[in-house]
Image (tube, rainbow, N blue to C red):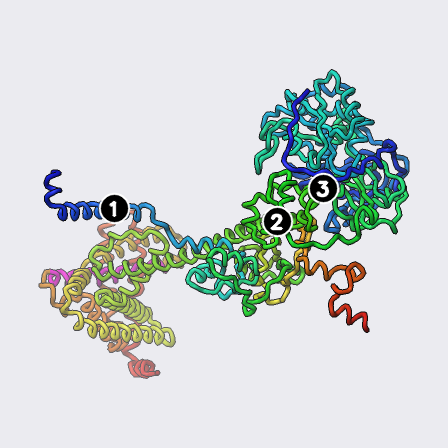
Amino acid sequence: MRKIWDFHGGVHPQENKRQSLASGIATLPLPEELTLPLNQHTGAPAIPVVALGDQVLKGQLIAEPVGMVSAALHAPTSGVVTAIADRQVPHPSGMSTTCIVIRPDGRDQWCDHQGLAEPLAASGDQLLARVRQAGITGLGGASFPTAVKLSPRQTITTLIINGTECEPYITADDILMRERAEEIVAGASIIARILGDPQTLLIGVEDNKPQAFEALEAAATGTGIEVVEFPTKYPSGGEKQLIEILTGQQVPSGKLPAELGIVCQNVGTARAVYRAVVFGEPLISRITTVTGKACASNRNYEVLLGTPVSHLLAHSGFDPDRCTRLVMGGPMMGFTLPDLSVPVVKASNCILACDASESPAVAPPQQACIRCGLCAEACPATLLPQQLYWYSQARDFDKVQAHDLFDCIECGACSYVCPSNIPLVQYYRAAKGEIRKLNGEKLKSDLARQRFESHQARLEKAEAEKAAKREARRLAAEAAQARVADGAADPGTHQPGSADELIAAAMAKAAARKASPEQQQAKLERGLELATSRLAAAESKLTEAHANEVSGEPLEKLEAQAEEARRKLEEARRKLAEFKPQTSGDKQAAAVADKIQASPREQLEAKVATLTKTMAAAREKLAATDDDAIRAALEQGLEKQRHKLADAEQQLAELGPEGDQQPGDPQILDAAAAAIARAQARAAAATEQSPAEKLEASIESLTSRIAKARDKLATARGEGSEHVEVLQSSLDKLEAKLASAREQHRQLRDQPQHNEVERSRP
Amino acid sequence: MIDLIVQNPLTAALFAMVGLAVVFGAVLGFAAVKFKVEGNPIVEQIDALLPQTQCGQCGYPGCRPYAEAIANGDAINKCPPGGQNTISALATLLDVPAPELDAEHGEATDVKKVAYIREAECIGCTKCIQACPVDAILGAAKLMHTVIASECTGCDLCVEPCPVDCIEMRPLPQTIAEWRWELPKPPGEQVRALKSADIIATDRTGSEQGDRAA
């Protein structure tokens, strides 16, 4: 005989169980419609896997669990899915939630299902998978998914099957134990296997159910399961209370029984596990007590889940006029149903239709708490209900939690004994709800704070990055300016890196160009050089035009060009002259000037070299080509270049002695300026010359060139050079030109007036 | 040594006191550096009690600035989203009497609302995204935007910038999971709620008697 402990408090309300135990478990005809809420369990609602209009078979999966704590849902009979919509569900709020509605086809045809004939030969995991697939939840009232409860992390040493059913009126477990004791014991063995065969297997039964106890005793013989009978007291069916009764251990506040190595399961759950494992039948029905004086026949029914309460009551002789309150669950912990259309769900163990003698329509008025302390004596969780009440109504949630509100099992023993008729449990439920809501809001507000802070941080970061970029640009510009100010002394030291730096450097350069006088001077000097060379080109063209006897518009054009080039040159020189006095004192300006002054000679030398090279190339081309026209053009070009070369050589010769002179005298040293002056003088002379004089000059030059060409031809012949022919032909041409020039000269002398008139034409 | 102390008790006492002062001064100085508290902890505590809607109805640009203002002595009743619960919590924390909510900053509502974008009308201007203090609006330029309802604090700040007025505040539907039991009414109100047939004549209120007379 096992030692029995007692728990603190408890009450002995009138049992009222006899009414519904007069007859055995009955079944009901199929209702018109079955309404199956997706959330009949603690945890996340299941997800429908059938569509509107689908034909379903009995036991077919219609909604699958989502997440860890959830349970599957199966069709209780064969039929058609007529709706997946919000329907009113049995809940104290009277609210609606999503339900699958099935209209039975009356055939009650099973889907394919298969059980394990030898369940104890299978592994725990296989059995657990079957329990999970069957959608079994705790049938004692809390409706917690059984598969989750049967996979604890701790090692389980004790399995307790709860056959206590301490709440008045309810006899669903009692009748089940009487009629299905073998199934319960077999289910308990399967649960024990799933939990890894704990040493202690107990079935606890109150001593007000002797028939159930005997039936279980008989069924459990030889299975190692001990059936324990203990004195009746409300609420010994509470999980923590039953554990204390059977093991003497108290489950600490905030902990689960599994942490003590104990798991509790209801007898109904054990039987559902047995059916699921051995026959492959999912949880589609349960035993529900229909009782109360407003019903003519009080008994237990095996009800399909989803059956409307109205259907159940219609077969029990329900008298709506007598009924003052329709309760789902027992009188202590149940709740008033908002409507008769709500369905029976997995947690519905009792439908209690009270008449006025059982439950007055209006509760007696609440009076002030007189601090009698009866509630504290009755509390099975050893709490101080009067303090909880006090702080709950004052909404002092810190204090109420400090008094362990969350250890309250809402059994209603305190309200039962309260002489002032205070609905204490309602206060606790409200306080719990409020605290949960506040905690949820707190979590949400923490999340919002986090998001707000990261939002702010992101904005700040973006702003800081922008500011840093601006600062970097400013610094780079400053540094570049500083470098320029330090002097362009060592411009090669800076290696521009990033694009920013490059831009900064370019900007700085532009600024420096504006600022530095040396650079400005250099620019002006470059302009001067350009103008000089342009003028030289224009003049040479002009000379050539004269030489080729071009007249009329082309000649005037060329002359205008030469004039323009001269004007530009003049301007450039004036600018340079204006600029020079400002900077003459500057040492650097002097250095730059040195450089420029030194260059004319080099320039000329380079010019000579280039011309020589170009001429050689031209000669080669001349030798290679056969076409007369091209040959003539090439020869002409060659002639021009020869002229240029001669000029350059002459200049170089003039410059020779000057190069040795003292630097620092810009007037003399500015060779470019000197060359310009010479060119100008020549151009001026050319314009001033009369055509006759021009012709004379050209005849002269032609003569000298012919002489030179003859010399060259002679040397070439002597050396046996391949250019002999080319030279010969060019000599012939020169001679022809000379002849024509002489002819022109003669003509010109004959009619000089005519020519004068032509020249003075605008 | 003992003799010296006995002969010069005053000097000895003086030295002892100075010595103690130096030792404890050093210990306190070390503790002040070693266990220095960064920032103002009361601001953190106040901020933790505020609802973090970041709506700015209090006149500050977010909950934390308001927390700082409260720490510097501002009134604690400027937060309509927090309502009386927040005011009570702040009053408890700061040990001051709890005032009524300042109506100037708006009224407390029990119904939680979240922003909702009528997506067909959205032109994708991103103005609401920039206005949202908790990044609860999803979208890109010239593409439709939408509100992540679970992240929305219902602060209202996105409604005003919308150029096409396609954002509205919708109350969150209450679900069974969120439903809570309500506190029973105080005894006096319970009596008044009873049907007149259930109470004796002298308990009847004036209005009920008036009704009967009429």
Q: Main secondary structure of the magenta part?
A: helix
Residue at disc 1, secondary structure = helix
How crowded pointer 2 is (Cα within 10 Å; few <14, some 14-19, many 20+) is rated as few
Q: Is residue A171 left or right of residue B160?
A: right
Report the residue at 27% width, 45% height from top: B27
Amino acid bearing label 3: Ile
Question: Closer to the N terminus: mark 2 or mark 3?
Answer: 3
Q: Tag on residue A47? A: 3
- At a point 80% along the width and 23% down the height, the residue shown is A215
The span picked out in magenta is A633-659
CB of mark 3 within 8 Å of CB of mark 1?
Answer: no
Marks 2 and 1, Cα distance to the nearest angstrom? Answer: 52 Å
Q: Chain of mark 3?
A: A
Image vertical order of residue B56 relative to residue A582, above or below: above
Residue linked to disc 2 = A371
Q: Nearer the viewer, mark 2 or mark 3?
A: 2
Amino acid on which the number 1 mark rests in the picture: Phe
Residue ID for mark 1: B24
Local crowd at mark 1 within 10 Å, few (<14), some, or many (≥20)? few
